[in-house]
Amino acid sequence: MKRILMKGNEAIAEAAVRAGCDLYFGYPITPQTEISEYLSSRLPEEGKVFLQAESEIAAIYMVYGAAAVGKRVLTSSSGPGISLKQEGISYLVSAELPAVIVNMSRGGPGLGNIQPSQSDYFQAVKGGGHGDYKTIVLAPDGMLGQMMEPVVFTEPQFDPLPPKDWAVSGKEGRKRRFIICFALDPQELEKVNQALQEKFRAMERNEIRYEIFGDEHPDLLLVGYGTVARILKSVVREGARKGLRLALVRPITLYPFPSAVMKEKAVQAGRVIDVEMNHGQMLEDVRLAVEGRVPVHFYGRSGGMIPTVEDTLQKVMDILSREGVKHENGI
Amino acid sequence: MKTVFERPHSLFDLPYPYCPGCHHGLAQRLIAEVIDELSISDRTIGVGPVGCSVYIYEHIDVDFVMGAHGRSPAIATGIKRSRPGTIVFSYQGDGDIAAIGTAEIIHAANRGENISCFFINNAIYGMTGGQMAPTSLLGQKTQTSPRGRKVQTEGYPFHLCEMLAVSEGSAYIARVALTNPRLIKKAKEAIRKAFLTQIEEQGFSLVEILSPCPTNWRLPPLEAVKWLEEHLMATYRIGEIKVKEGVTNAC
Amino acid sequence: MNRVIINQEYCKGCGYCIQICPQKVLSFSEEFNTHGYYPANVGRREVCIGCGFCAQVCPDVAISVYRGDEL
């Protein structure tokens, strides 16, 4: 398996092609524009469709149209563009149309800047659009859109997907179908909502993914995802060298949130520190999961600033000494 | 017995939910007639908007995708790019296409997207109860221009057909009205040409259909039609606004 | 004998067909339908020339027109 040097953006784009992406609709915005650029040549090579839309709003509704006719479709953007897509995402959920949306997130709010950030967590996880809905939110292992790293592409194995017999395609040979996103009768709309909620419960039962790293019997549990989780792995290693027993829980799915393992590991360690590139968003879900059984501390940077291993380790050691936890070698 | 007129095959035998005298039902009937005559119902996909037009999906026997206010041309683009073999049409009101959805319709036209867009212009927001629309006329009193639309504050009536005609992506653009059998016949011809433009892949087509809105114009149907002919048609010239050379589609 | 059939439940009494009919065959019914509209009614069937204008202008597709072959 060949290792190739690739930017995070290009790796995501190539992965989409290998996963059978049929169409991509996008709009330029730093720091994700290489996704569009890469796919603008790569998709036509595969006989697939690339189109740059006039806005992120138009792009999400082109995605809506492609999904309605049963195609695998992708769009990507960053903070401000993802905000523009929120109405479309609520419509996609209402019409039960599958699609993939990539947010290469950046410093916010407002125009913010183009450095990395995790300040879109609430928007993604709590539902940034109108109505009761959730979307599966995946936080990959931490990559910076514009930074290169060695990448290995494994051959994708899919278990066969069920036929999209709900998709619209022209009614030849069948009764006509339609995709709708409303129900004017409140009893109907409540049924629609109940069915959607059932789907979200199923996600919570079947789609939770996380990684545990570090000491089997930690004195402190670190929690972080994406780019921050990489940094926290270094904190765990550095801590071990200093005789500190640390462990990390890295949520891979931000929704559905790995609450059970979070609580179990937190209680085992006795204290938690959640580290994010925002002012405490996943922190709320960690606290909800831990239900006050042990203290949950927080360390965050924002505006595109990235927490360093040293600063984070210092925070960890402050907590441990404050809470009178003896080190392995008594420092 | 020879049939002079019967309900078109692709129009479900259902009552319309529209107000008495509203031309939405008439416009949808003509679209269904043309779909039948071109025998394309099996591969046609309609894209519906938000507003009074939204009910179209219940009435025409083709696949439909209903989406957000103003976004039909983008949804139609997503569909057509995904399944180029289908015939895709969108059906929108004036608020949908010429207010919130202005960017989508202009760019769909400018891309020469091979879709057919039908635009019902009744110079008012119907479903929400009679607010001013981009196409409302100067002096027209509405729920949000109670003293009549003024240039200084509300700007000018919106001429979408003429704006889109400037784009080289637009292959066929016409504006029609349905106030008498002669105009209805010409309107049907325009709808037919729009679909043929798409079938022959010559680019973007749009037909604007002027329609009365008796309820929100606060006029009984027959007077609403008279107002349309005297005022709406004075501001919005009907006829073929653009026929790109090479667009033959002889009827 | 030409025949005009009006679905009086679909009709909302807008009056377009009554106005357009060159032979003044149609008029408002004395009775209102279940929705409370006074629908169009075929009054003077014998003078209908089967032109179909009424059906053409009907926004509710409530009218069908047939032309008799013994003319």
Image (spheres, rainbow, N blue to C red):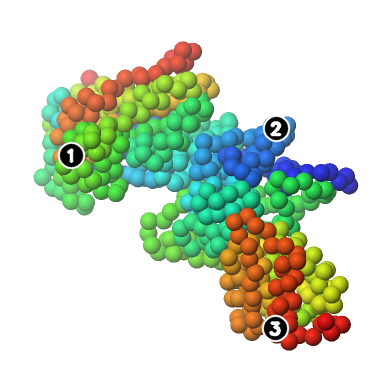
Q: Please, which residue is most extreme toward the right here? A: A1
The three-letter amino acid code for the residue at tag 2 is Ser
* N-terminal-most mark, 3 or 2: 2
Q: Residue at x 81, y 78 (%)?
A: A245
**A58 lies left or right of B223:** right
C-alpha separation, residue under disc 1 versus residue under disc 3: 72 Å
Q: Position of residue C6 (x, y in %)?
A: 23, 38
Q: Quarter of the image holding residue A121?
A: bottom right
Chain of the residue under label 1: B
Q: Please tell me the numbered disc located at residue A41.
A: 2
Amino acid at pointer 3: Arg
Where is mark 1, residue-wise? B148
Same subunit: marks 1 and 3: no
**Residue B19 picture location, percent across and down:** 24, 44
Q: Nearer the viewer, residue B174 or A180?
A: B174
Q: Is residue B234 visible?
A: yes
Callout 1 amino acid: Gly
Assess disc 3: are there few (<14), some (14-19) or many (≥20) residues with their C-alpha within 10 Å of its C-alpha: few
Q: Secondary structure at mark 1?
A: loop
